[in-house]
């Protein structure tokens, strides 16, 4: 059960580093399901929410003993925050149907009825953004304010250095310098809290997106037609459910670094120009060249991910077949051929993943070193143009370049996760637009069941077929639209042992 118990059934205190310092060493009992508390995030006061102190009771329990499912919070109906997946699904369907109707009217008005209607490529992206716009805007507001606080910190550092340089000369009171020091500490503290709330809120939004997409995928999988089931076997659906939705979840957080990058870039550059003049533009040019290299890497990253996804789907499909047919594989000793098949698929997949990781690491290395090169170029240009500047301008400008490095270092990772998320959304959109199976498509007219005595089976006959015709649709390119069995005559008596096998023994 994951929890330590004494012989008499009592819970045992978990031994950790700080356990001897605990004043109260009593282990909290596991609550009953009826005693579980509701999720408190949106019910606590502003101070508890800002410092994440609403988590302390749960952390306190987890430090003393392993957490159990009944220790976790319950989700209540909340119209303002949409905590339950059913509420998120209703809101998503409203926006999705509205966009789908608009796309369908556009398809009709453009006279494209000769081609089948397909979901627009970006309909899922814009619907998700519209569904979770309040949560996402709030999370990105924290990031924007945190970037502003980060960019303003070097200004206070410059004033503090100036004060330290001039204080022996002017014999000014130290209160001003202490104020600058407290101001820097306050900005660093505020920036840390804002960044923590950004990652928490985007992570929570990503978890909501993942739960919603999982429900959409599972609901759709029950409505697939025979043709769609052929296009999307269980292995491919499992791949979308496990890999693609996880990448979309991760992209929710890192996508913010892309569209907010201009803000995080513009403020430090403007302050650099104010600090050391136009010579800062020489260093900025190096950063812009680095930015173009990062943007240029998006296309090959997307290409490698697409190729890897094809091999991933094939590998998952093969593993599914192996698990479902393990008895037959063991009976015919087909372990080695199937092992070689999965190994070959995995090897092809790893080739593409290694290319992807190598390209990502190269771009990341360029981004990390670009700020060092750009700052050196800017200072050399400044020295050649105006000579040596004050220590306050030089060190504060170096801090501005460090601020730029924080933006550039995360940019390759952001582009990489964004391309993975885009590909996952595209694959999921194609799946949601697949053909469905409707009850109206059933045709029972070919069945003629009679209950008269002359049509009743003999007592010793369990199953009887006379001139039976059975057909099912075929979606293979080299076969007809439908295949089946014709003119089947079969009689199975009660207690008779019968084996029906195909050409390969299945």
Image (spheres, rainbow, N blue to C red):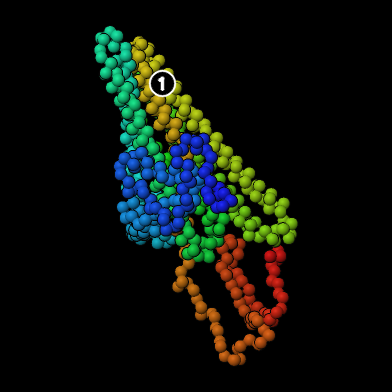
- The total of numbered circles placed on residues is 1
Q: Position of residue 66 (x, y in %)?
A: 51, 46
Of residues 117 and 34, the one nearer the viewer is: 34
Q: At 33% from the left edge and 16% from the top edge, which residue is drawn?
A: 161
Q: Residue furthest bottom?
A: 453
Quarter-of-image position of residue 497: bottom right
Q: Position of residue 309 (x, y in %)?
A: 54, 48
Which residue position is annotated with label 1?
375
Above/below status of 482 relative to 187: below
Above/below status of 197 relative to 186: below
Above/below status of 272 relative to 413: above
Q: At 35% from the left edge and 20% from the top edge, which residue is drawn?
A: 396
SS type, badge 1: helix
Q: Position of residue 176 (x, y in %)?
A: 26, 18
Q: At 62% from the left edge and 54% from the top edge, which residue is drawn?
A: 318
Q: Residues within 10 Å of mark 1 (few under 14, many from 20)?
A: many
Confirm whether residue 191 shows in the render: yes
Of residues 213 and 107, the one nearer the viewer is: 213
Q: Position of residue 285 (x, y in %)?
A: 39, 25
In this rendering, position of residue 376 left or right of residue 135: right
Of residues 464 and 70, the one nearer the viewer is: 70
Quarter-of-image position of residue 279: top left
Q: Quadrant of the C terminus?
A: bottom right
Q: At 30% from the left edge and 44% from the top edge, which residue is drawn?
A: 45
Confirm whether residue 96 shows in the render: no
Q: Residue furthest front?
A: 8
Q: Residue furthest top?
A: 169
């Amino acid at each position: 059960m994951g929890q330590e118990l004494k012989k008499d059934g009592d819970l045992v205190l978990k031994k950790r580093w700080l356990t001897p310092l605990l004043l109260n060493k009593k282990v909290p009992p596991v609550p009953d399901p009826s005693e579980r508390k509701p999720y408190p995030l949106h019910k606590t006061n502003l101070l508890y929410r800002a410092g994440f102190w609403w988590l302390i009771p749960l952390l306190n329990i987890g430090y003393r003993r392993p957490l159990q499912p009944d220790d976790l919070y319950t989700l209540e109906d909340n119209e303002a925050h949409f905590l339950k997946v059913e509420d998120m699904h209703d809101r998503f369907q409203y926006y999705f149907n509205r966009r789908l109707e608009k796309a369908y009217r556009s398809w009709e008005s453009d006279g494209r009825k000769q081609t089948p209607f397909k979901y627009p490529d970006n309909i899922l992206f814009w619907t998700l953004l519209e569904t979770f716009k309040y949560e996402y805007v709030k999370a990105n507001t924290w990031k924007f304010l945190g970037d502003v606080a980060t960019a303003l910190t070097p200004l206070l550092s410059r004033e503090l250095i100036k004060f330290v340089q001039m204080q022996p000369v002017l014999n000014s009171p130290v209160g001003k310098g202490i104020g600058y020091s407290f101001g820097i500490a306050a900005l660093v503290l505020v920036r840390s809290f804002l960044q923590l709330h950004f990652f928490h809120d985007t992570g929570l939004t990503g978890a909501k997106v993942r739960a919603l997409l999982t429900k959409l995928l599972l609901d759709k999988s029950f409505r697939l037609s025979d043709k769609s089931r052929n296009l999307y076997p269980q292995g491919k659906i499992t791949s979308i459910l496990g890999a693609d939705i996880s990448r979309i979840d991760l992209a929710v957080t890192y996508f913010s670094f892309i569209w907010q990058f201009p803000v995080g870039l513009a403020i430090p550059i403007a302050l650099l120009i104010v600090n050391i003049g136009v010579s800062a533009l020489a260093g900025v040019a190096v950063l812009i060249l680095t930015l173009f290299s990062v943007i240029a890497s998006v296309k090959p990253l997307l290409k490698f991910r697409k190729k890897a996804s094809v091999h991933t789907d094939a590998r998952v499909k093969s593993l599914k077949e192996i698990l479902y047919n393990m008895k037959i594989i063991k009976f015919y000793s087909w372990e080695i051929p199937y092992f070689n098949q999965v190994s070959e698929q995995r090897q092809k997949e790893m080739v593409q993943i290694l290319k992807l990781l190598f390209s990502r690491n190269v771009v990341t290395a360029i981004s990390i070193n670009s700020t060092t090169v750009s700052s050196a170029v800017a200072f050399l240009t400044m020295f050649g143009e105006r000579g040596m500047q004050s220590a306050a301008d030089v060190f504060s400008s170096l801090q501005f370049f460090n601020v730029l490095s924080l933006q550039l270092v995360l940019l390759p990772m952001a582009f990489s996760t964004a391309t993975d998320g885009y590909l996952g959304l595209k694959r999921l959109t194609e799946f949601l637009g697949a053909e469905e199976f409707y009850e109206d498509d059933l045709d029972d007219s070919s069945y003629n069941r009679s209950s008269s005595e002359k049509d009743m089976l003999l007592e010793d006959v369990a199953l009887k077929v006379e001139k039976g015709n059975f057909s099912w649709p075929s979606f293979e390119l080299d076969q007809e639209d439908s295949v089946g069995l014709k003119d089947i005559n079969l009689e199975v008596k009660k207690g008779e042992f019968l084996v029906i096998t195909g050409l390969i023994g299945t």
